[in-house]
Image: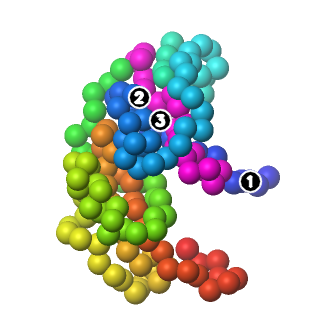
């Protein structure tokens, strides 16, 4: 019995169209599965709630790991107010590798993306030598995303 790989990371969103704008038009991800509505016994059994109806889409970079965005139509809920408290147990984030974090930082600010990190990205050498620069941001629903600019790892090094 083995875990064979990562499939996707799922984020609940309030408005699928607004989230697609953020992930596609601002972050530059591509649609990997077109928006569709799902309901019925199977999806209700998977999430453990009755009478589920949701809209969902998948976006990604084409590397095999997608971001699943889903908007619950039934039931609906209120947006959490504590999503920026990344220290709370149960908090989560996904991380993207980027090529020029300073340019990303500027673009994100220009697009009024909420940046959780304090100030401009700064170089670090330790404890993670490959993740040279990193910032935390939030999508329109408060889901946390880390953007990391990495140095090239020596061949054969599996350290993350």
The image quarter containing residue 153 is: bottom right
Distance, label 3 to label 2, CA atoms, is 7 Å
Distance, label 2 to label 1, CA atoms, is 29 Å
Residue at which label 2 appears:
16
Task: Identify the magenta region.
Answer: 56-75
Residue at which label 1 appears:
4
Q: Is residue 113 above or below residue 140?
A: below
Question: Callout 3: 10 Å neighbours few (<14), some, many (20+)?
Answer: many
Between discs 2 and 1, the one toward the N terminus: 1
* Percent coordinates x, y for residue 159 in the rendering: 59, 78
Q: Which quadrant: the C terminus?
A: bottom right
Give me the residue at 27% from left, 27% from top. Answer: 78
The colour scheme of the drawn protein is: rainbow
Look at the image and say whether residue 111 sits in the magenta stretch. no
The chief SS type of the magenta part is strand
Residue at which label 3 appears:
69
Give me the residue at 56% from left, 51% from top. Answer: 61
Q: Please say if the residues under marks 3 and 2 sit with CB atoms less than 8 Å apart.
A: yes
Taking depth in this image into account, of 97 and 3 the one nearest to the observer is: 97
Between discs 3 and 1, the one toward the N terminus: 1
Disc 2, SS: helix
Distance, label 3 to label 1, CA atoms, is 23 Å
Question: Callout 1: 10 Å neighbours few (<14), some, many (20+)?
Answer: few
* Percent coordinates x, y for residue 9 in the rendering: 53, 45
Q: Please say if the residues under marks 3 and 1 sit with CB atoms less than 8 Å apart.
A: no
Look at the image and say whether residue 71 sits in the magenta stretch. yes
Viewer can see residue 104: yes
Disc 1, SS: loop
Give me the residue at 53% from left, 18% from top. Answer: 37
Disc 3, SS: strand
The image quarter containing residue 131 is: bottom left
């Amino acid at each position: 019995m083995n875990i064979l790989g990562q499939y996707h990371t799922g984020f609940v969103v309030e408005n699928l169209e607004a989230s697609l704008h953020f992930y596609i038009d601002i972050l530059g991800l591509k649609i990997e599965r077109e928006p569709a509505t799902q309901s019925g016994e199977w999806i209700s059994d998977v999430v453990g709630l009755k009478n589920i109806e949701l809209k969902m889409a998948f976006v990604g970079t084409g590397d095999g790991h997608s971001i699943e965005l889903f908007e619950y139509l039934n039931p609906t809920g209120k947006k959490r107010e504590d999503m920026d408290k990344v220290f709370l147990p149960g908090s989560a984030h996904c991380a993207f590798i980027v090529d020029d974090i300073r340019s990303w930082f500027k673009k994100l600010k220009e697009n009024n993306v909420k940046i959780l990190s304090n100030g401009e990205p700064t170089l670090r050498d330790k404890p993670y030598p490959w993740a040279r620069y990193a910032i935390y941001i939030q999508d329109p629903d408060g889901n946390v995303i880390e953007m990391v600019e990495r140095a090239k790892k020596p061949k054969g090094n599996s350290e993350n």
